[in-house]
């Protein structure tokens, strides 16, 4: 996913009536880190999130709350806007599927799909009757073969959600005719369109199997976007929801600057549960409308909580606001992307969180910065010291720091391997700690103050590189660290890496405060 000037990055729009939880925060966090990384690397970025507000599930929740649906969604969508603020997401837009711009876009997309023929020369959309299993919870149709038996012998979707038999007139999308085109699409860009590879295999084998035409309209409820020319039908909520990605670029105004710059999307970041919607239905709809499909879809894994599936009924849903309040925002952002290889499932445990905060943030990175900054503050008149001639050990450390961005660019930009990027960054953090331990600047203070100045300067330059590269993960903490180093505001993007943006000797330094404090458990209350 590299080599372009402008990147369009999206995260799934949240089901508006859900309560924000760690899973929501995770998809968008990964996308936020990618967006921030690309911006710092000199690219134009458009990063989108928002809320998915139509469908039977929302209609039912509004009715249960005794509210008109629009009034209900206006209120609950604010919880997700608040999540973006809480998590410090840098989204450029927040789309709601009940907005006028989206309704216009969906109807136009439908018209184009309907106006075109499938690759087999048939109508892409036709009217018939749907009879089959539907899960309101998943807003998805299920074939008989996909159902499982519940504890009382009742039929359940493979996801465990209840299903009901639905029989009603429906428009269908001729999915089957798009098989070959979809398979060609997966092979593009050396087969990296769907990532990770295991997900690509999963999707490919699904498409090679029996593909049923997809029911894309409903008549038994009304909370949705009317089908153009047939108001008795509303569009299937997933067709409506997926279209948000193109609406936000200005579609159907294809002359708009945003559309021209950003479509097709560079990357849709999604969880593995919604892979099929993004890699089968969505590209097929787009191709049928004569539009370009997204360049890449990355599906990450799922989190469990202390080893258990996260679910409302188990009462173990992790509210991002709670963990941010307990552990700190940047600590949570770091943990979520460091703990689990991106793409795999992972487990959230308090122990693992505290472990990483104390060993990697407080001990490794925090201590490195605090030690160097406080020595400069005390022993160099609170100024960035003037280095003397560099020795081999200095050059080795600086070269590792300077080369780091190239590795990280590949891991984040190309592979979305956030955990791997952090592992590489921490290798340099540890190397810098080793350098300080070897050079012993506290000894040099008495024996060779000039050499001490060089060692502290070299270490500070290394910390500047680390803090600059870590900004996408931990924006606030890294900004504080860069402030403490006296790095100029305008010299914090990746063009400042290397010697071009080197710290300026003589710059005044503020009194340093630890950026990553240790996490100390509250003492149990007496009695
Ligand atoms: N509304 C749809 C998306 C429509 S996009 C056109 C939807 N919304 S969601 O709110 O249920 O999910 C949002 C994101 O949260 C998805 O990427 C989903 O995978 C992710 N997660 C929800 N629970 C999760 C975990 N327990 N773990 C990790 N991520 C999970 O789907």
Image (cartoon, grey):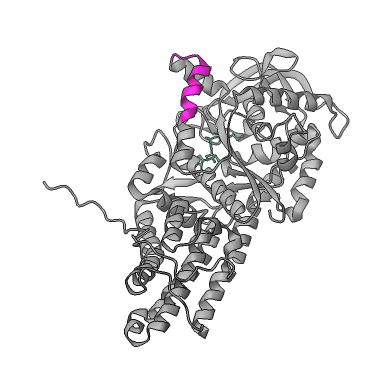
Residue 471 on image: x %, y %: 50, 56
**Residue with the most extreme right position:** 121
Q: Is residue 37 left or right of residue 314?
A: right
Q: In this view, does 73 lie to the left or right of 106?
A: left
Residue drawn at (47%, 26%) of the image:
76
Q: Which of the 4 quarters of the picture holds residue 105?
A: top right
Q: In this view, does 114 lie above or below 242?
A: above
Q: Can residue 406 be seen in this view?
A: yes
Q: Is residue 190 magenta?
A: no
Residues drawn in magenta:
66-78
Q: Which SS type dominates the magenta stretch?
A: helix
**Residue with the most extreme top position:** 232
Q: Is residue 138 above or below residue 219?
A: below
Q: Is residue 414 above or below residue 389?
A: above
Q: Which of the 4 quarters of the picture holds residue 51?
A: top right
Camera-nearest residue between 85 and 168: 85
Camera-nearest residue between 58 and 422: 422
**Residue with the most extreme left position:** 527
Q: In this view, does 366 lie above or below 303?
A: below
Residue 131 on image: x %, y %: 66, 20
Residue 197 on image: x %, y %: 66, 54
Camera-nearest residue between 413 and 211: 413
Camera-nearest residue between 471 and 32: 471
Q: In this view, does 111 lie to the left or right of 141?
A: right
Q: Is residue 248 left or right of residue 397?
A: right
Residue drawn at (51%, 46%) of the image:
29
Q: Can residue 318 be seen in this view?
A: no
């Amino acid at each position: 996913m590299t080599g372009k000037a402008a990147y369009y990055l999206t995260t799934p729009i949240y089901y508006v009536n859900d309560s924000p939880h760690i899973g929501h925060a995770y998809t968008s966090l990964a996308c936020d880190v990618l967006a921030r990384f690309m911006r710092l690397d000199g690219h134009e970025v458009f990063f989108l999130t928002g809320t998915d507000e139509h469908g039977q599930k929302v209609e039912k929740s509004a009715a249960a709350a005794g509210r008109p649906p629009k009034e209900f969604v206006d209120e609950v969508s604010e919880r997700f806007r608040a999540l973006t603020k809480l998590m410090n997401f840098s989204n450029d837009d927040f789309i709601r599927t009940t907005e006028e711009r989206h309704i216009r876009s969906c109807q136009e997309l439908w018209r184009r799909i309907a106006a075109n023929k499938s690759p087999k020369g048939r109508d892409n959309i036709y009217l018939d009757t749907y009879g089959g299993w539907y899960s309101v919870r998943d807003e998805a149709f299920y074939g008989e073969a996909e159902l499982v038996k519940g504890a009382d012998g009742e039929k359940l979707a493979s996801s465990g959600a209840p299903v009901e038999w639905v029989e009603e007139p429906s428009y269908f999308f001729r999915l089957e005719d798009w098989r070959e085109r979809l398979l060609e699409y997966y092979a593009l860009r050396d087969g990296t369109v769907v990532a990770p590879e295991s997900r690509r295999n999963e999707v490919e084998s699904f498409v090679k199997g029996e593909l049923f035409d997809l029911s894309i309209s409903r008549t038994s409820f009304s909370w949705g976007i009317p089908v153009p020319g047939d108001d008795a039908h509303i569009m299937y909520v997933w067709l409506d929801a997926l279209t948000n990605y193109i609406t936000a670029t200005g579609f159907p105004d294809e002359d708009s600057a945003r559309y021209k710059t950003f479509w097709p999307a560079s990357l849709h970041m999604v969880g593995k549960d919604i892979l099929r919607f993004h890699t089968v239905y969505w590209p097929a709809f787009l191709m049928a409308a004569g539009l370009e499909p997204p360049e890449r879809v990355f599906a990450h894994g799922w989190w469990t909580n202390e080893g258990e599936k996260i679910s409302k009924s188990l009462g173990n849903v992790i509210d991002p606001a709670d963990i941010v309040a307990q552990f700190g925002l940047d600590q949570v952002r770091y943990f979520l992307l460091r703990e689990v290889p991106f793409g795999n499932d992972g487990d959230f445990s308090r122990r693992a969180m505290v472990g990483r905060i104390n060993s990697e943030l407080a001990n490794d990175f925090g201590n490195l910065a605090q030690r160097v900054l406080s020595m400069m503050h005390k022993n160099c008149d609170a100024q960035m010291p003037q280095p003397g001639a560099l020795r081999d050990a200095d050059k080795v450390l600086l070269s590792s720091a300077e080369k780091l961005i190239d590795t990280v660019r590949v891991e984040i930009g190309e592979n979305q391997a956030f955990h791997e990027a952090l592992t590489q960054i921490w290798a340099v953090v540890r190397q810098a700690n080793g350098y300080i331990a070897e050079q012993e600047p506290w000894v040099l203070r008495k024996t060779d103050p000039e050499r001490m100045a060089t060692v502290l300067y070299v270490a500070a330059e290394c910390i500047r590189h680390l803090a600059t590269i870590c900004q996408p993960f931990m924006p606030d903490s890294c900004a504080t660290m860069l402030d403490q180093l006296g790095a100029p505001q305008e010299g914090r993007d990746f063009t400042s890496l290397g010697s071009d943006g080197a710290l300026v000797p003589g710059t005044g330094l503020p009194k340093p405060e630890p950026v990553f404090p240790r996490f100390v458990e509250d003492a149990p209350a007496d009695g």
